[in-house]
């Protein structure tokens, strides 16, 4: 295969399903890892050059960041589904309109994030009882990020368009470039200029803007697949509503998870700076450990979407089985690595022995959950690609709000002691494992008896 063909739109309705899935999922995985590097490098740099409190500040800001950006990520998910179905159906005019509306929606989302996020950042941090020792750093980090959120929003939506067209390699390349730039700027701003937490936020904003610009330039070079004109940028009710209709449940799913993190973050904050820092370290490593699951889930959405658009429902069933087997295999391998070498990874963030030991103990609680999440992500991805975005949303709402939050607070109450007056940290991670296991069981159940097959058979696009 020539280099140019690697970075082009790909038809996933032909060939062996596992091969098409692997060709798409591997670049997707590498791209997700590169994106995760943004926050991880931020944490490593501030942890090493500023201290554990700065590390806690970056982590405490994350739940708010995820909540306010969740709906915009949902738009990207809806965009990818619509684009994949239009492309699979060979509908050039509908594809062009959908891509144009995605760009317009990205502009609207960016303005909303800039205006709302910068105004409510500190009030939300105060609502979460963020310790006074880190609240100013948290505020600086969030405000800078929100004011420069256009890069994040445009990258996510435009990369969703590229993935819907079957091109996951371009998104990977642009993210790698941005991740390298982010790392260089992080060290330069923090170690060189002494800008602290504000420096890592500014570095992330600049790097994300570069990745968004590269995605746009790539789309400009794909005129053989669709037409991008001023007319296609005009909002069309049917096209925009279709993107939003499919994307909002996915956005709500992300928002519910972020909201649950915020509620549990309040519990985490009550346990003190050491537990906050431990949670930050675990969640940063968790971000990488979850990447194969997320990558296969996103891949299965595109794979199912293109095949539904082409009327190849037989390939959806076959691809689901093969994709699930690959995802579970990847997650099992990652679980083993975390159990054997987790302490080496945690040492990247801090040299504090007590903090390292605590992080290792907490990761042992979570490890098995990554295999469960492989099932949840793959089956949820297939359902979304077939047009059923509501069912995965309800599964997430049930496992995070109904199960995880009460379990976390209940375990914290039951484990109060002199050393941990507000509950042991095991309550935080044990409740998360419980929600992951139940999510896998529920996803398997609704997948078998759910409505996604009717959506696919009716032609959801």
Image (cartoon, rainbow, N blue to C red):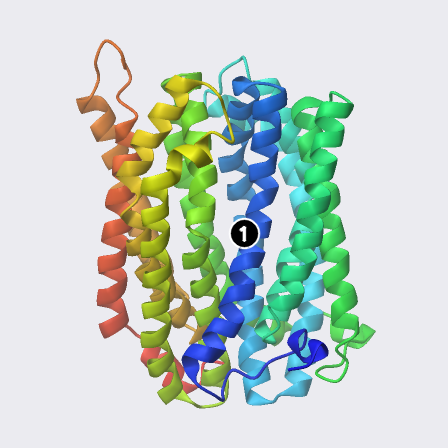
**Label 1 secondary element:** helix
* Residue sticking out furthest to the right: 230
Residue occupying the point 68% across, 77% down: 97
Judged left or right of residue 411, residue 100 is right
Front residue (pair 196, 234): 196
Q: Is residue 269 visible?
A: no
Observer-nearest of 169 and 146:
169
- Residue 72 point in image, percent of width and height: 58, 54
Q: Is residue 131 above or below residue 452?
A: above
Q: Kindly tell me whether residue 231 is visible in this rendering.
A: yes
Side (left or right) of 5 relative to 166: right
Taking the spot 67% from the left edge, 37% from the top edge, the residue there is 145
What's the residue at 33%, 49% (across, down)? Answer: 335
Q: Quadrant of residue 187?
A: top right
Residue 373 position by quadrant? bottom left
Q: Position of residue 267 (x, y in %)?
A: 36, 25
Residue 79 or residue 24, whichever sits in front: 24
Q: Is residue 216 above or below residue 86?
A: above
Q: Nearer the viewer, residue 2 or 314?
A: 2
Number of callouts: 1
Residue labelled with disc 1 = 33
Give the image location of residue 338, x and y in percent. Answer: 36, 43
Q: Quadrant of the N terminus?
A: bottom right
Q: Quadrant of residue 118?
A: top right
367 is higher (above) or lower (below) than 52: below
At x 54% / y 13%, what residue is drawn?
133
């Amino acid at each position: 295969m020539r280099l140019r063909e690697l970075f082009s739109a790909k038809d996933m309705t032909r060939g062996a399903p596992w091969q098409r899935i692997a060709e798409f999922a591997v670049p997707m995985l590498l791209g997700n890892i590169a994106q995760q590097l943004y926050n991880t490098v931020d944490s490593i740099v501030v942890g090493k050059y500023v201290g554990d409190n700065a590390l806690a500040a970056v982590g405490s800001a994350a739940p708010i960041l995820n909540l306010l950006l969740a709906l915009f990520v949902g738009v990207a998910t809806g965009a990818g589904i619509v684009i994949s179905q239009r492309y699979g159906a060979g509908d050039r005019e509908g594809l062009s309109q959908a891509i144009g509306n995605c760009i317009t929606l990205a502009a609207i989302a960016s303005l909303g994030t800039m205006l709302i996020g910068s105004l409510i950042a500190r009030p939300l941090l105060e609502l979460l009882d963020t310790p006074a020792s880190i609240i100013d750093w948290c505020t600086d980090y969030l405000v800078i990020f929100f004011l420069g959120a256009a890069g994040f929003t445009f990258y996510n939506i435009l990369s969703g368009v590229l993935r819907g067209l079957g091109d996951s390699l371009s998104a990977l390349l642009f993210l790698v470039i941005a991740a390298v730039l982010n790392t260089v700027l992080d060290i330069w701003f923090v170690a060189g200029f002494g800008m602290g937490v504000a420096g890592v936020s500014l570095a992330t904003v600049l790097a994300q803007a570069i990745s968004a610009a590269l995605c746009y330039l790539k789309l400009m070079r794909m005129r053989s697949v669709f037409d991008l004109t001023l007319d296609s940028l005009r909002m069309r009710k049917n096209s925009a509503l279709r993107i939003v209709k499919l994307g909002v449940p996915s956005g709500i799913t992300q928002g519910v998870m972020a909201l649950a993190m915020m509620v549990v973050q309040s519990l985490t904050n009550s346990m003190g700076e050491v537990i906050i820092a431990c949670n930050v370290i675990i969640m940063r490593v968790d971000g990488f450990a979850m990447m194969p699951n997320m990558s296969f889930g996103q891949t299965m959405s595109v794979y199912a979407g293109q095949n539904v658009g082409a009327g190849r429902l037989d390939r959806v069933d076959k691809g689901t089985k093969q994709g699930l087997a690959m995802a579970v295999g990847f997650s099992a391998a990652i679980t083993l690595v975390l159990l054997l070498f987790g302490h080496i990874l945690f040492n990247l963030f801090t040299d504090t022995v007590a903090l390292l030991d605590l992080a290792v103990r907490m990761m042992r609680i979570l490890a098995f959950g990554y295999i469960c999440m492989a099932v949840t992500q793959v089956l949820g991805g297939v359902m979304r690609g077939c047009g059923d975005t509501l069912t995965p949303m309800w599964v997430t709402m049930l496992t995070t709000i109904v199960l995880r939050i009460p379990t976390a607070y209940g375990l914290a109450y039951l484990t109060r002691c002199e050393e941990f007056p507000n509950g042991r940290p095991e309550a935080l991670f044990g409740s998360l494992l419980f929600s992951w296991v139940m999510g896998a069981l529920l996803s398997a159940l609704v997948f078998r008896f759910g409505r996604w097959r009717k959506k696919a058979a009716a032609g959801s696009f």
